[in-house]
Amino acid sequence: MDETAYRQILSSTVPSACPFEKSILSSCAACSKAEKRNIAEREIVACNDAQALERCIALRNLFRINFTFALGRPHIDGPLPHAQEMRMQCGGLKGLQVMLDDSDQVTDVAELLEMSQQKFGSLSDFPFEQIVRLAKTHYKFR
């Protein structure tokens, strides 16, 4: 299947694609709201909770803004190379988890965001400078 046809089928059948799909598929994080599916011999992750999806999209957008320096980019305006996306997703989630409970095992992204919002307030109030610093320490791309 060519890539264009795949993308068309994907967008029409899975409108709720998980923004942390790469980190979930690589087993660096898990989520109770994630649902794995197969399309054209590829595994994808969809979100089964609209509110959680909205929060995760917002967090991923904030990661993209706050990880620019760590990724050596002046700004991120398009897709990232796989290694940089993994560093941002896995590292960011692990850094946030460490800030909550000194563990870098992200067992539920949805729960992590709920607990983080209780501790820090809105997503924009998260201490991204510390999260990015912890991301470098707790995620190493192999």
Image (cartoon, helix red, strand yellow):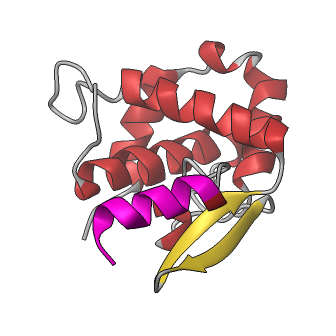
As drawn, which residue projects farthest toward the bottom?
A: 41
**Horizontal and vertical percent for residue 21?**
53, 59
Range drawn in magenta: 1-12
**In which quadrant is the N terminus drawn?**
bottom left
Please give the name of the residue rendered at 22% of the width and 51% of the height, measured from the top-left corner.
81
User: Which secondary structure is most common in the magenta stretch?
Assistant: helix
Residue 120 visible in the current orientation = yes
Which percent across, then down, holds residue 127?
Answer: 55, 20
> With respect to residue 64, does 13 lie above or below?
below
Q: Would residue 83 appear left or right of 44 to someone viewing this image?
A: left
Identity of the residue drawn at 41% across and 66% down: 6
| 57 relative to 76 in the view: left or right | right
From the viewer's perspective, is residue 124 above or below residue 50? above
User: Looking at the figure, which quarter contains the C terminus?
Assistant: bottom left
* Residue drawn at x 46%, y 86% as measured from the top left: 41
* Residue 27 seen anywhere in this rendered image of the structure: no
Residue 2 location, x and y as percent?
A: 29, 71
Q: Is 43 colored magenta in this rendering?
A: no
Of residues 108 and 50, the one nearer the viewer is: 50
User: In the image, residue 18 lies at what x, y percent?
Assistant: 61, 52
Residue 141 vertical position relative to residue 109 in the rendered view, above or below: below
In the rendered image, which quarter is residue 52 located in? top right
Pick the residue in front: 64 or 140: 64
Quadrant of the rendered image containing residue 39: bottom right
In front: 116, or 31?
Answer: 31
Q: Residue at x 27, y 57 (%)?
A: 82
* In-image side of 122 versus 118 (left or right): left
6 shown above or below 111: below
